[in-house]
Image (cartoon, rainbow, N blue to C red):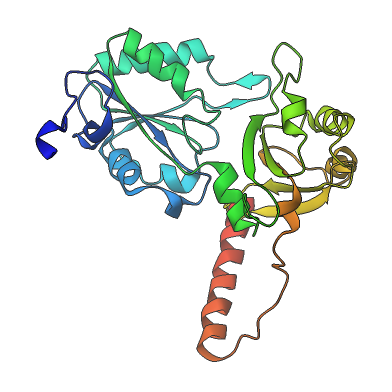
Amino acid sequence: MRDNIELTNSGYLFALGVDNRRPFLPGEVVLIGAGPGDVELLTVRAYKLIQEADCVVYDRLVSADVMALVSDNAECIYVGKQSSNHALPQEEINKLLIEKAQAGCKVARLKGGDSFIFGRGGEEVQMLLDAGVYCRVVPGITAASACTTYSGIPLTHRDYVHGCTFVTGHLKDDLLDLPWHALAREDHTLVVYMGIKTAGALSKALIEHQLPAKTPVALISDGTSLQHRSYKTTLAELPSFIEANSIKAPTLIVIGKVVNALDVSKRASVKGEMKQILGAWEQNRFESVQRLAI
């Protein structure tokens, strides 16, 4: 049986299947999902390739801890984007990647989360292929998975929901154009990326399409980082809650019954060696947060 298995696809520009394990090639661009923020959530392959890169093109949501892994000899180029404030337009990022690859660099294109989940990774890969550039994609843990897990929220739970959908709250042509009939389901979890600015329109549309106003909603800010914060409200109260608590991006919105599926408020009785270990961790975390604030 194994004689019929194609073990290599080395004739292709894009690293298919097992070729994703090939060495980092001079003149290659690797799109690396840097995960949600916690550096220890990087994959082993991402860690290795980041250290091998001699040119790193990175986005705003790539954490400082991840960037600290980059070689001191590597050129680091920031191309982060915020609403109405882009360090470099997408077209210029595309040109930059091609230029660095054609110059023979090992280019790491670092993106927060996973490059193929609302990260414009597909567009960049197609552009690289059209330009004849070797490329591959290393998956990363996406925010929807990591941030909810760190907040004690299971995306699926057979007692509550039968599926989960990821959508973007980002406007296209000034419209929040989503399939509302398909999304307004009580037996489904809805995760909204980049939805803080459009939360009012999101709440209104879902309620108009018969999702109950009391549906639980979680907001998770700076997920998995030392500043990780999670809040709970309802679909009807979502816009006013965001305003009252001055919640800003990056924040993930999770809508559905799973928000309240687990009771994670129970406290433990901590004694002995465990108390010492946790006490030291709390002090270290406090000092780290203070340094970040400065």
44 versus 58 height, above or below: below
Residue at 50 percent across and 37 percent down: it is: 112
Q: Quadrant of the N terminus?
A: top left
Q: Quadrant for residue 285, please give it.
A: bottom right
Q: Nearer the viewer, residue 134 or 84?
A: 134
Where does residue 235 sit, x and y in percent of width and height?
Answer: 84, 42
Residue at 50 percent across and 24 percent down: it is: 79
47 versus 81 height, above or below: below
Q: Do we see residue 294 in this rendering? A: no
**Please, which residue is most extreme toward the left here?**
3
Residue at 52 percent across and 47 percent down: it is: 37
In the picture, measured across the screen, residue 259 lies left or right of residue 19, that is right
Where does residue 29 sit, x and y in percent of width and height?
Answer: 31, 24
**Please, which residue is most extreme toward the top here?**
130
Q: Quadrant for residue 291, please give it.
A: bottom right
In the picture, measured across the screen, residue 73 lies left or right of residue 183, that is left
In the picture, measured across the screen, residue 40 lies left or right of residue 198, that is left
Q: Do we see residue 164 in this rendering? A: yes
Q: Quadrant for residue 247, please give it.
A: top right
92 versus 258 height, above or below: above
Q: Nearer the viewer, residue 293 or 90?
A: 90
Where does residue 289 sit, x and y in percent of width and height?
Answer: 61, 58
